[in-house]
Image: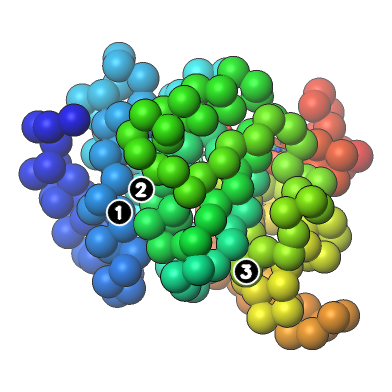
Amino acid sequence: MTGFSSERDRMIERQIVGRGLVDSRVIEAMRAVPRECFVPEAVRGAAYQDGPLPIGASQTISQPYIVALMVEAAEIRPGDRVLEVGAGSGYAAAVMSRLAGEVDAIERHGALADEASERLARLGFGNVRVHAGDGTLGLPERAPFDAILSAAGGPEVPETLRRQLRVGGRLIMPVGSRRGDQVLVKVLRRDADRFDTLPLGPVSFVPLIGAMGWRDDESEPV
Ligand code: SAM
């Protein structure tokens, strides 16, 4: 799609570089993905605004800065195998696909997963696979992963996801309350049983709903 490249450049300069993100590979990946193609027609004109946007099923595409922050923190290298929990529109998976070897992305809403899968194929992001299901269980048949990102916030980092990280791998996810008062954390797998956890800062995400996350209808963890 044409017509949005100056908005995209402005978004990169003001929202990404202007806030101190410096990884040139991440910046180029953000420049290469047409965010306007990942949002509903009705909000396309707002595609490069500095915030999340609705994508249907009461879910959102994350703020561009937050996508860049998480992807930079994940230190994705060429050839890496990446898992995203919470594929939503497929936008963050598309950004990561420019940096990684392969991306698997899981989405619990089947309709969003189907749309994201069709969109990514149409736009030529051939190294992304979208799966419908509960991402708190990870994707054991595709593990281990060099990087795991969760685009939804849980009460804690699911043990299932930690165990699907390769030694040396990085996991980035929001942890905290169900209602969007969370801390973004980075988990590093040092060896088979040693994990270090670093806080990256306060964030506000939709809840991670699933067997190792929040219940579908209550505020307590499963
Ligand atoms: N990364 C997405 C994008 O680029 O559009 C934004 C994702 S949105 C902030 C979070 C997504 O996580 C929602 O689409 C939600 O349905 C999904 N989600 C929540 N819990 C999940 C789970 N257990 N497994 C898979 N997806 C989940």
What kind of residue is marked 3?
A: Asp
Q: Is mark 2 within 8 Å of ligand 1?
A: no
Q: Position of residue 39 (x, y in %)?
A: 36, 27
Is 165 placed left or right of 6 in the picture? right
Q: Is residue 12 above or below residue 128?
A: below
Question: What is the number of the mark on residue 30?
Answer: 1
Q: Is residue 40 left or right of residue 127?
A: left
- Residue 6 image-quadrant placement: top left
Residue at horizontal 59 percent and vertical 62 percent from the top:
81
Quadrant containing the N terminus is top left
* Image quadrant where one finds the C terminus: top right
Residues at discs 1 and 2 in contact (Cβ within 8 Å): yes
**Residue in the image at 33% along x and 34% along y:** 123
Alpha carbon separation for disc pair 2 and 3: 23 Å
Name the element at disc 3. strand
> Viewer-nearest of labels 1 and 2?
1
The residue carrying pointer 3 sits among few (fewer than 14), some (14 to 19) or many (20 or more) residues within 10 Å by Cα, namely many
**Residue drawn at (87%, 80%) of the image:** 193
Q: What is the number of the mark on residue 64?
A: 2
